[in-house]
Amino acid sequence: MKPSMEQLIERAKSGDETARSDLIQKYKPFILKVSASFCGRSLSWGNDEELSIALMAFNEAIDNFDHSMGSSFLSYAYLVINRRLTDYMRKEGKNRRRFIPAGDIFTDPCLEIEGKGFNDERELEKIMWKEEMLLFCRTIEDFGITLKELAASSPKHQRVRRKIADIAKKISSDSKLTCYILQNRRLPIKEIVSKFKLQRKFVETWRRYLIALIIIEAGPQFTLIKEYINSLFKGENEQ
């Protein structure tokens, strides 16, 4: 009787290199599909660095996976691969070519392993959003902001939201200024007012919202939140 995925993972974590090799060979199509979808282009083993990054991420997922997390291993591996590829793209100054909905990886009929297609869309979306939102909440709390306060202090008018989003993008493109904000957990309001020709009252009024957008813009770990926010602004612009 062939060992289950769970058994192979436990053996690999215990140092069984044969079990690890079996897992990698078995799920190479999965690693390739996730990586190609992330990059928005075809990839091939031995020719694309992205696949090397994804393979290391898959090994990382094997080492760190915990069944008590309440998710499947493949959902977790998908998450780790995307995080590591995001880090790689940011470091190399490359752009992710297009956004692929997370569930599309698992419902693609072309990707089958042992005759079974992946169908983990709900679980995958849940674990990814949960992780990002928990991390986001912890991050804004470092600035003395709660999610409830952020929601209450967010602008209601489209024009104001768009203006603050533009300011956040400009600030995030200034590495020195962004580094100061993230390290000191506060906005240098005087410098921002002077640099971007803004009214002090405007910045002070929307301080929480501006900080939140800067955190999202500057943080590669907030991929889903950023995609969601950008889609909202895009929808507003098309109205």
Image (spheres, rainbow, N blue to C red):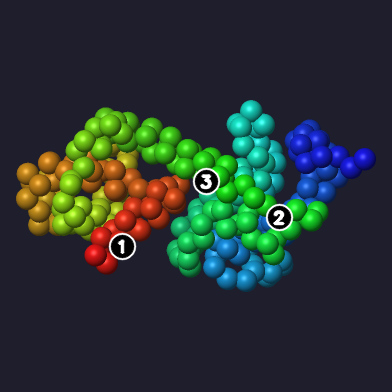
Which comes before the other along the chain, label 2 or label 3? 2
Other residues around mark 1 within 10 Å, as few (<14) / some (14–19) / many (≥20): few
Say if residue 70 shows up in the picture. Answer: yes
In 3D space, how far apart are the residues under numbered discs 2 and 3 (Cα atoms)?
A: 17 Å
Other residues around mark 2 within 10 Å, as few (<14) / some (14–19) / many (≥20): some
Question: Could you tell me which residue is drawn at 64 percent across and 60 percent down?
Answer: 108
Question: Could you tell me which residue is drawn at 21 percent across and 36 percent down?
Answer: 152
- Residue 200 in picture, x, y percent from top left: 8, 46
Question: Could you tell me which residue is drawn at 77 percent across and 34 percent down?
Answer: 10
Residue pointed to by mark 1: 234
Kindly identify the amino acid type of the residue bearing the numbered disc 2: Gly
Residue pointed to by mark 3: 125
Q: Nearer the viewer, mark 1 or mark 2?
A: 2
Left or right side of 130 for 185: left
Q: Quadrant of residue 75?
A: top right
- Residue 127 in picture, x, y percent from top left: 53, 40
Residue pointed to by mark 2: 117
| Disc 3 element | helix
Kindly identify the amino acid type of the residue bearing the numbered disc 1: Lys
Say if residue 218 shows up in the picture. Answer: no
Kindly identify the amino acid type of the residue bearing the numbered disc 3: Glu
